[in-house]
Amino acid sequence: MNPAATRRFGRVDLRVTPLGFGGGPIGNIFRAVTEEDAAAIVAEAWNAGVRFFDTAPMYGHGLSEARLGAALRWRPRDEFAISTKVGRVLTAAPRASIDFRPWVDGLPNKMRFDYSYDGTMRSLEDSLQRLGLERIEIVFIHDCDVFTHGPQHQPGRFREALDGAYRALDRLRGEGVVRAIGMGVNEWQVCHAALQERDFDCFLLAGRYTLLEQEALDAFLPLCEARGAAVVLGAAYNSGILATGAVAGAKYNYAPAPEPVLARVRRMEAVCARHGVPLKAAAMQFVLGHPAIPTTVPGCRSVEQMADTVAAFRHDIPADFWAELKHEGLIRADAPVPG
């Protein structure tokens, strides 16, 4: 695949590169990335042809937005698209009073959830200032899912998001301030429910449509196709195992991978070996086989990781590889594949 090729972003008059840039790592998730390395990673992505960049206030308590804006500030503005998120409002505070976990050395801002109309407007205005750019193309309502809020509180947060944040973003879309509005969560079921209730353009779905998980094919992705809603696929490696393989300590959904998952990945690795296909390349390219998914946004914490990601993206994968995965029952028979 060509990382510099562009695809239409669903029904929106906007084109994005199929390989996007996930801004979580340059927000210092789990460990610090230096200012110089963060700028170099963005430059490596740009030089490879990447022109879609995703970030969020959550990432490093504003650090990812600040770094991404600085790295892109003097690039031709009409040549790239940015997405960020609303749902958390940041407030300056003494560094000693902030629990940054899982971020390291973030900006000195406390975070609080706020899915209200006013909170959404404030969040987006603050994001523009941190980015130092005059516009943001895509805005997602962030993390109003069970994974984040738990089953007891999620229904209320979801309703707040639809009644508050959606209303604000719908107004901004109507005024031409933003091009596309959506929801960014860890569960396809939440996206499906949101699309049934409101007129969303897009979703950022983290990890719920991958080589290991294809339940989204049952209802959510068909509805996206019918409505022209684009899906940005995040966490195509299921938080690690589809990049590292079934090694000791491999992560699946941010926790140690259970044995059934390890066994399934070992079988995938055997197919990969027979066809000379890196597992990482298969995981990244598979998700782009679906017509509702124009782009994926892997995160990289070094120039070397970014270069490796680009190489995997460009790796030629034969049709026989996908056919064998289906024959072995490792991916669903009805899963669209690249080609």
Image (tube, rainbow, N blue to C red):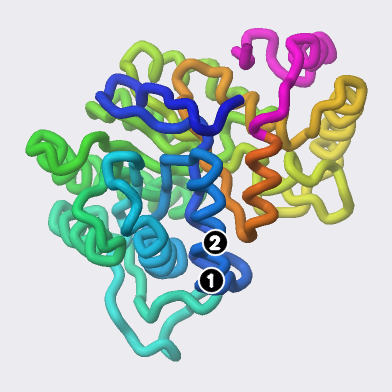
Position in image of residue 199 (x %, y %): 23, 27
Crowding at label 1, few (<14), some or many (≥20) Cα neighbours within 10 Å?
A: few
At numbered mark 1, what does the secondary structure look like: helix, strand or loop?
helix
Crowding at label 2, few (<14), some or many (≥20) Cα neighbours within 10 Å?
A: some
Residue at screen point 19% across, 54% down? 134
Residue 264 appears in the figure: yes
Q: Is residue 105 left or right of residue 141?
A: right
Q: Is residue 95 above or below residue 196?
A: below
Position in image of residue 67 (x %, y %): 42, 65
The amino acid pointed to by label 1 is Glu
Q: Quadrant of residue 113?
A: bottom left
- The residue closer to the viewer here, 205 or 302, is 302
Q: Quadrant of residue 302?
A: bottom right
Question: Any magenta on residue 335?
Answer: yes
Residue beneath label 2, please?
Answer: 40
Q: Is residue 283 above or below residue 289?
A: below
Residue at screen point 29% across, 28% down? 14
Residue at screen point 35% across, 22% down? 10
Residue 212 appears in the figure: no
* Residue contact between numbered discs 2 and 1, judged by CB atoms under 8 Å: yes
Q: Which residues are magenta?
A: 313-339
Q: Is residue 299 above or below residue 29?
A: above
Residue at screen point 74% across, 10% down? 319
The amino acid pointed to by label 2 is Ala
Q: Quadrant of the N terminus?
A: top right
Position in image of residue 95 (x %, y %): 42, 87
Residue beneath label 1, please?
Answer: 36
Q: Is residue 65 above or below residue 151?
A: below
